[in-house]
């Protein structure tokens, strides 16, 4: 037998073995689409070899490492799933998808470097479901991106659904479902951030918060047209709610929160909207915000602003605060105007947990104007009413309808220079607990109560000391 005769079968066997080994080492995406073996390496290879648009096939793909869009190295990349038929199961700690840029500037064109426009601008992620299978899995993480777009995604069971870190500019998150995450739906995590739009999304049933900022230097965020609900609240007293903005060492600035539904359950701790500015920069660390046209209700508190300034809350329907509807703490220059605040009509049964009410503590220059406040039960015989101002300075309650409060309409405790004018304050039917339409107590001074239409049962105005203020030109309404 010749050497050639012996060699060819041996080579054939060797090549066949190598081919089989290669096939075992690198199965096709179709073979990986059942989610039983990690597809991270194969999908990352797609990203690396793509000329820009990465079309992920339908199927369930298990990840044991993140899919990285390394824009400085690879250039422009967009990741597109099969319109909801692509599922990524994140079985590791960290992001399922990491979009990594190197943007160093702001949104000002003069600060954007050439490499950002030439290799990194406008990455996008769309059409995928991301399912967490690890307690520290995050869905999508953005770092140093410019004009990133996330749209049409479903993220659930992750620690954080979408997380922004370091520095990002001009981010759009739209038409997304961020559901049942362990901690937060959308997290702005100690980042330098301007110009973020979050719109048209469902963000619900997350363990701690729907949308949350923690620290960072954050400006110009629009949260509009979303349904943000039932973000239950963390154990251990951590800040929790539908929208939670907390910056003990950072800045919260230029938020527009419009046209959303923010709802939970009365037993959930925290607030539907919770804003906590820094102690060392009170009240300027949380500033320049508008909250308008939202439906906000059913939580321990509905709106809490602490250490904030230049905030306008207008045209909202606010209802069902188990403890309070609105709580302002050490704030300045706040406008509460044209809001409808109170319980639902069926929320007056004795077993109902809602107390409702507006509490203003240690604040300057707060304007409550043109609101309807109905059926509030906040307060005790000692203190409190539908509107309670504690050590408030140059605040005004004017042009409001304060209907059927259980104990008092307006209670001024201490403070100076506040005005209660041109309101209608009516006693509740029966009214056995009702004490006064307006009461001034404590060491307050120079307050003015005038031109109101006040219930005459049992006292329209209680004034312990003439030095507390002036009462004049009020009209008494007949007892109900």
Image (cartoon, grey):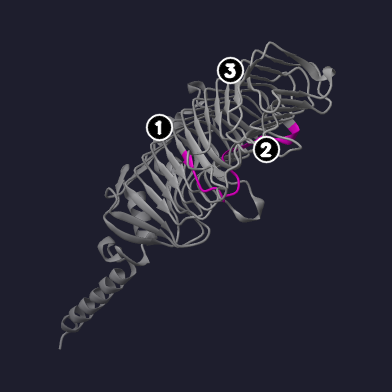
The label shown at residue 215 is none
Per the image, label 3 sits on a secondary structure element best described as loop
Residue 382 drawn in magenta? no
- Real-space Cα separation, disc 2 to disc 1, in angstroms: 70 Å
Residue drawn at x 59%, y 46% is 240
Left or right relative to 353: residue 133: left
The label shown at residue 118 is 1
Place of residue 1 in the rendered image (x, y in percent of width and height, measured from the top left): 15, 89
Per the image, label 1 sits on a secondary structure element best described as helix
Judge by depth and name the residue closer to the eye, 480 or 216.
480
Q: Considering only order in the chain, which callout, 1 or 2, is on the residue closer to the N terminus?
A: 1
Place of residue 159 in the rendered image (x, y in percent of width and height, measured from the top left): 51, 54
Q: Within the image, what quadrant is residue 192 found in?
A: top right
Circle 1 crowding by C-alpha within 10 Å: few under 14, some 14–19, many from 20: few
Place of residue 139 in the rendered image (x, y in percent of width and height, measured from the top left): 45, 51
The residue range painted magenta reads 262-280
- Real-space Cα separation, disc 3 to disc 1, in angstroms: 57 Å
Circle 3 crowding by C-alpha within 10 Å: few under 14, some 14–19, many from 20: many
Residue receiving disc 3: 399
Mark 3 or mark 1: which is in front? Answer: 3
Residue receiving disc 2: 433
Q: Report if residue 206 is visible in the image.
A: yes
Q: Is residue 179 above or below residue 456?
A: below
Q: Is residue 232 above or below residue 441?
A: below
């Amino acid at each position: 037998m010749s050497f050639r005769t012996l060699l060819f079968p041996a080579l054939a066997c060797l090549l066949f073995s190598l081919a089989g080994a290669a096939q075992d080492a690198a199965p096709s995406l179709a073979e990986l689409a059942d989610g039983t073996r990690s597809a991270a390496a194969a999908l990352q290879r797609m990203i690396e070899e793509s000329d820009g648009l990465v079309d992920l096939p339908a199927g369930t793909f298990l990840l044991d490492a993140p899919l990285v869009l390394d824009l400085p190295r690879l250039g422009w990349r967009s990741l597109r799933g099969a319109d909801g038929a692509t599922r990524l199961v994140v079985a590791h700690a960290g992001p399922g998808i990491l979009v990594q840029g190197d943007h160093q500037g702001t949104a000002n064109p003069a600060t954007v470097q050439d490499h950002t426009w030439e290799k990194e601008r406008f990455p996008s992620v769309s059409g995928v479901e991301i399912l967490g299978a690890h307690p520290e899995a995050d869905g999508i993480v953005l770092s140093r991106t410019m004009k990133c777009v996330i749209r049409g995604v479903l993220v659930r069971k992750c620690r954080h659904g979408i997380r922004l870190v370091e520095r990002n500019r001009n981010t759009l998150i739209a038409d997304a479902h961020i559901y049942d995450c362990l901690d937060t739906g959308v997290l702005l995590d100690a980042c330098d951030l301007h110009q973020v739009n979050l719109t048209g999304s469902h963000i619900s049933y997350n363990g701690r918060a729907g949308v949350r900022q923690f620290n960072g230097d954050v400006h110009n965020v629009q949260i509009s047209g979303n349904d943000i609900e039932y973000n239950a609240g963390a154990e251990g007293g951590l800040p929790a709610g539908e929208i939670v903005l907390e910056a003990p060492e950072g800045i919260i600035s230029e938020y527009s929160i419009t046209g959303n539904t923010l709802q939970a359950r009365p037993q959930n701790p925290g607030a539907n909207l919770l804003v906590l500015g820094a102690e060392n920069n009170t009240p300027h660390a949380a500033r320049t915000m508008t909250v308008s046209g939202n439906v906000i209700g059913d939580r321990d508190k509905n709106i809490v602003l602490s250490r904030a300034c230049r905030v306008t809350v207008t045209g909202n329907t606010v209802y069902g605060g188990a403890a309070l509807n609105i709580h302002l703490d050490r704030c300045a220059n706040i406008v509460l105007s044209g809001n409808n605040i109170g319980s639902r009509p069926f929320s007056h049964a004795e077993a109902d947990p809602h107390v409702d009410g507006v509490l203003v503590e240690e604040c300057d220059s707060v304007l409550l104007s043109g609101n309807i406040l109905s059926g509030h039960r906040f307060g005790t015989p000692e203190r409190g009413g539908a509107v309670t101002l504690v050590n408030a300075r140059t605040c005004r309650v004017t042009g409001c309808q304060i209907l059927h409060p259980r104990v008092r309409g307006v209670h001024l405790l201490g403070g100076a220079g506040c005005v209660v004018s041109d309101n209608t304050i009516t006693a509740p039917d029966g009214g056995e607990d009702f004490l006064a339409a307006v009461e001034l107590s404590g060491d307050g001074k120079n307050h003015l109560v005038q031109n109101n239409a006040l219930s005459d049962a049992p006292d329209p105005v209680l004034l312990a000391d003439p030095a507390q203020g002036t009462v004049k030109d009020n009209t008494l309404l007949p007892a109900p």
